[in-house]
Image: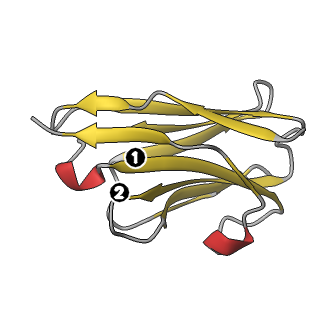
Amino acid sequence: EVQLVESGGGLVQPGGSLRLSCTASGFTIDDYALGWFRQAPGKEREAVATVSTTDGLAYYADSVKDRFIISSDNAKNTVDLQMNSLKPEDTAVYYCAALEGDSRYYRLDEYEYWGQGTQVTVSS
């Protein structure tokens, strides 16, 4: 059974950091596109960062560029999202997702596997 399980969410003050981790099971992430997405209340789900395990190249949304870093570890079958300089507008449920492919530019609706999500709240 294919599963993606996120961890690491929580409450953090503005300017703080959090590291989200997503562990994949039921498949190996080699030659997969992996992504972190988020959905805030009343808003559509959006891409935050994606990475191709084939070439290691990543995509970042403009809103998180230079603050967030996505990384994958084929040996551990994980994809992490290091989030720095967090802002209240980063508050959302964060999801990891995967699909078999070699690009970092797949559309959100093309991702085949999704985790259950983890809440990130940035507030003082």
Classify the position of the C terminus by image quarter.
top left
Q: Residue at x 81, y 62 (%)?
A: 102
| Amino acid identity at mark 2 | Val
Around disc 2, counting alpha carbons within 10 Å, would you say few (fewer than 14), some (14 to 19), or many (20 or more)? some
Q: Secondary structure at mark 1?
A: strand
Q: CA distance from mark 2 to mark 1?
A: 6 Å
Residue 1 percent across, percent down from the top left: 90, 38
Residue 121 percent across, percent down from the top left: 28, 40
Give the residue at mark 2: 64
Q: Is residue 106 visible?
A: no
Q: Is residue 85 visible?
A: yes
Give the residue at mark 1: 68
Q: Residue at x 61, y 47 (%)?
A: 96
Residue 39 is left or right of residue 106, and the answer is left
Residue 99 percent across, percent down from the top left: 79, 58
| Amino acid identity at mark 1 | Phe
Pointers 2 and 1 in contact (CB under 8 A)?
yes
Q: Secondary structure at mark 2?
A: loop
